[in-house]
Amino acid sequence: MKTIEILIAILLAYIAYQNYKINGATFRIQKDKFRLDLFNRRHDVFKSFQNLIENVMRNGIPTREALGIFNTQTSDAEFLFGEDIKNYVEDFRNKSLRSIHINERLADSNRDTDVNKIKELADELYNLEMWFGEQYKNSRVLFRKYLHFSISKKI
């Protein structure tokens, strides 16, 4: 009778060990799936920056339509990133709106005959366009720490 009890105990220990290994593997798979899902959501926000920058490079200023898409695609950024990206989103929005407003004011410059004011606005618009051009590289640097993805073998 003791031999059967020993065999049953050994079998139960083996089954428990196999369950432990399966649970560990399942945990790692779930952890990596979560990281992949988070990576995909963060990458979508990054792509929205790239798309708005491309829009500015094509048009000189962001279009209202492109800014609307950007606002929609970055609405969850504060939950997916740190304070640095949250502030970057706000800076992008503010500079985009400023570009649009300056462009509209310059287009309607027939009513504003102050040549110095027109030149000042044109210079500011130029500086904003240059700033957007620099953001292609700057955004990559800023997002890099959030978009690093590697599958770890550690638990």
Image (tube, rainbow, N blue to C red):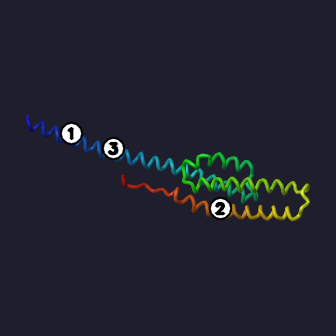
Compared to residue 92, the image places residue 37 above or below, namely above
Disc on the earlier residue, 2 or 3: 3
Residue at 87% in and 54% down:
108
Say few, some or many: other residues with alpha carbon within 10 Å of mark 2 (under 14 / 14 to 19 / 20 or more): some
Which numbered circle lies on residue 12? Answer: 1
Of badges 2 and 3, nearer the viewer stands 2
Q: State the residue position of label 2.
A: 135
Q: State the residue position of label 3.
A: 23
Element class at badge 1: helix
Q: CA distance from mark 3 to mark 1?
A: 16 Å
Front one among 25 and 88? 88
What's the residue type where badge 2 is placed? Gln
Q: CA distance from mark 2 to mark 1?
A: 60 Å
Element class at badge 2: helix
Farthest top residue in view: 1
Image position of 125 (left or right of 115): left
Of badges 2 and 1, nearer the viewer stands 2
Image position of 118 (left or right of 72): right
The answer to whether marks 2 and 3 mark residues whose Cβ atoms lie closer than 8 Å is no
Say few, some or many: other residues with alpha carbon within 10 Å of mark 3 (under 14 / 14 to 19 / 20 or more): few
Residue at 57% in and 60% down:
142
Element class at badge 3: helix
